[in-house]
Amino acid sequence: MSRIWNFSAGPAVLPLPVLEQIRDELLDWHGAGLGVMEMSHRGKEFTAIIEQAEADLRELLAIPANYRVLFLQGGATQQFAQIPMNLLANGLANKSADYLVTGSWSKKAFKEAQRIASVRCAGSTEGAAFQSLPELATLDLDPQAAYFHLCTNETIHGVEVPPEYVLPVNVPVVADMSSHILSRPIDVSRYGLIYAGAQKNVGAAGVTLVIVREDLLGHAAPSIPSVMDYAVMAENGSMLNTPPTFSIYVAGLVFQWLKKQGGLAAIERVNIEKAALLYACIDGSAGFYRNPVAVACRSRMNVPFTLADSTLDVAFLAESKAAGLASLKGHKSFGGMRASIYNAMSLEGVRVLVDFMNDFSRRYAGTKA
């Protein structure tokens, strides 16, 4: 069986060595006589797995000691509600929170938070089709806000917040990093809370990472369910109830794979090369392909693009699939195409895609499908 080149936005491609290790350990994990899916989450075997996963994640991201790492469920979408439940109650009820809307996911986060608490839109680029980032000075910020929320990589629109982007310093910054966490080094101390669904750069769907500064714990309203309270989950080591054990195990293997690649600085160099190759193909196509995002905030992970002649979309998708290039259809809210080139997508895979795109444009330039 030959594997395809999988450019899915998520669930996404996993590193082949990780998949092979999962296969080899599926029936018998380290001589235990059973697989991880069958283990008690209270047993010593799984305790070793989750503790190692947290230790490796802390090492990769250089997470300060005053931050707690939580392995939760419900995806990033559940965090859209869980964050205001935890950070806008119990003594903070008179406060609001500021949201920066730069794409579909931050827009959804803002809309969901409005159902829970008092929140404000501090700025939005929706009027400009989500193609850029506003400067901090242009935002309508509340200096008394409980937190400032943003999505640092918009999976659908392909807008990424670069490391040099200026963030508020007088309020906790809450960041949805679902689609680019672990793709580059970050300064965790710039954020009060970071959250990310697993199914892009972390592992298999089912587990959600939350990295939260300790002083932000303990502000949840007494009325919210215990399982939604960060402080309760932290006190119980993410195991108030049965956690997504297999997804945590897969994430741990991905963390170990990243360490073997040389860590986040090393993987970032590869990601820079992959993104540069693909954007050069788009920009050098004489308008055949187009990416509308401002160059300074183009995503390294999710590259949306359109064909100048949209009647060629069907042919592009059919021929790319036949060439072993899968999941290139763009999100319905953007249209066109999207190539998600996460950590596990190799440079070779991006080269195969670029070769196909160059060949396709040569054959179809000036024609109609």
Image (cartoon, helix red, strand yellow):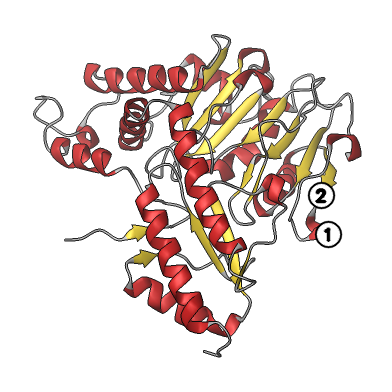
Question: In front: 318, or 179?
Answer: 318
Q: Residue at x 74, y 45 (%)?
A: 110
- Secondary structure, mark 1, is helix
The reply to whether callout 2 and callout 1 are in contact (CB within 8 Å) is: yes
Relative to 228, say whether 311 is above or below: below
Question: In front: 288, or 369?
Answer: 288
Picture coordinates of residue 342, whole percent (x, y): 45, 46
Displayed quadrant of residue 21 = top left
Question: Which amino acid, by three-letter code, is at mark 2?
Answer: Ser
Displayed quadrant of residue 54 = top left
Picture coordinates of residue 317, whole percent (x, y): 44, 75
Picture coordinates of residue 49, whole percent (x, y): 29, 22
> Dot 2 corresponds to which residue?
124
Picture coordinates of residue 339, whole percent (x, y): 49, 58
Question: In front: 94, or 254?
Answer: 254
Answer yes or no: is residue 162 visible: yes
Q: Residue at x 54, y 9 (%)?
A: 65
> Dot 1 corresponds to which residue?
127
Question: Which amino acid, by three-letter code, is at mark 1?
Answer: Gly
Answer yes or no: is residue 237 visible: no
Relative to 230, say whether 298 is above or below: below
Q: CA distance from mark 2 to mark 1?
A: 7 Å
- Secondary structure, mark 2, is strand
For residue 308, side relative to residue 209 (left or right): right
Q: Residue at x 48, y 35 (%)?
A: 269
Which quarter shows the N terminus?
Answer: bottom left
- Label 1 Cα crowd, 10 Å radius (few <14 / some 14-19 / many 20+): few
